[in-house]
Amino acid sequence: MKFNKLHLLAISALVLYSCGSKQEETVTEAETVKVITVKAEERSYTPTMVFTGTVFANREANLGAALPGKVERIFFEEGQTVKKGDLIVELSDEMLTQAEIEYQALKKDYERVSRLREKGSISEMEYDHVKAKFEASEAKTQMVRKNTQVYAPFSGTIVERMMEEGEVYFINPGLDPGYSMRSGIVRLMQLDLVTIKFDLNEKDLAIVKAGYNADIEIDAYPKKTFSGEISSIKPMLTTLTRTSPAEVKISNPNGDLKPGMFARVTINLPEQKAVFIPFKTIFRLPGTAEDFVWVVKENAVYKTVVKRIYSDGDLVAVSGLENNAELIADGKFRVSEGQEVEVVRK
């Protein structure tokens, strides 16, 4: 009996010692975790900003006259190009005929009183009265003549005939939102150069400047990119949207870009430098907006907060991190602050 008790005590001691040794080994193994690391790298990049805009003609005008009248003839069809100075529209000349008859009559009166004045047979007051009527008639005739014919003020394309021959033209405002709201008989646009208009938010005005390069994407041409530069930024903001209108000029020799098209404007900002890291090294605690990475120093890990600046594929430019910092790429969920790790460099 005594032997059995001693035997059992010895066995129990051996079991306890064995368990203690295994537990110690487990703890020791848990303290060292194998991780794969990568290096942060400083590199140059060109940041971009993307806006939505609309294509407009470089110049546009609704051509009409200062006086109402019947449209006798329109010399060009929609889609035809014209040169500066071409006769576009001719209106009825009934008013011109009447004005010219009146002018000829007053011209004769003026010539007659001029001869009488030279002989001293008429008072200066009577002469001035006839002269004033003659000069007024001459100005009226020139004005009516000018408004019976409409000429192109610049070279461009007739994009719309707003009236047809035989209709009576009145001075009424157009009702085509987004384009010229002036009245007219035909709409003329300069399309060999187009303008992309977009709005800059208030906070963007300190970043985006006139002269910056811009890439334009149009849905109608998904595989083509048009290039230009910011030609102007309006020096005021609208009170409703707190935005400032900006424009990009694009050469359009083939007429591919048409007014009204939707455009995506990518502004290329000046080149900058930043520290880039793989996206997979960034860790974010659930329920927070704070990003951090695990930095390895002398085989120990330390949490470092970073802020994202710019993304380029699988790489992210961040602030708050030094160049060549060693980061955990694989194993970041198995470590804690200050823990020793075994580094497997990639």
Image (cartoon, rainbow, N blue to C red):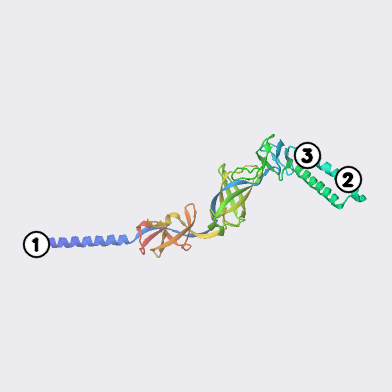
- Locate residue 286 relative to residue 209 in the image: left or right: left
| Number of marks present in the image shown | 3
Residue 13, quarter of the rendered image: bottom left
Q: CA distance from mark 2 to mark 1?
A: 163 Å
Judged from this view, the residue extending furthest toward the right is: 119
- Locate residue 151 relative to residue 268 in the image: left or right: right
- Whole-percent x and y of residue 96? 77, 40
| Label 1: how many Cα within 10 Å (few below 14, some 14–19, many 20+) | few
Disc 2: which residue:
112
Residue 280 visible from this viewpoint: yes
| Label 3: how many Cα within 10 Å (few below 14, some 14–19, many 20+) | few
Labels 3 and 2 touching (C-beta < 8 A): no
Residue 204, quarter of the rendered image: bottom right
| Label 2: how many Cα within 10 Å (few below 14, some 14–19, many 20+) | few
Disc 3: which residue:
98
Residue 93 visible from this viewpoint: no
Q: Name the residue located 58 percent from the left edge and 48 percent from the top edge.
A: 216
Amino acid type assigned to the residue bearing label 3 in the image: Gln
- Whole-percent x and y of residue 335? 35, 59
Amino acid type assigned to the residue bearing label 1 in the image: Phe
- Locate residue 59 relative to residue 344 in the image: left or right: right
Work out whether mark 3 precedes mark 2 in sequence or the reverse, and give the earlier one: 3
Judged from this view, the residue extending furthest toward the left is: 1
- Whole-percent x and y of residue 274? 51, 60
Label 3, secondary structure: give it: helix
Q: Which residue is more in the foreground, 185 or 266?
A: 185
Q: Which residue is more in the foreground, 26 or 141?
A: 141
Q: Which mark is residue 3?
A: 1
Q: CA distance from mark 3 to mark 2?
A: 22 Å
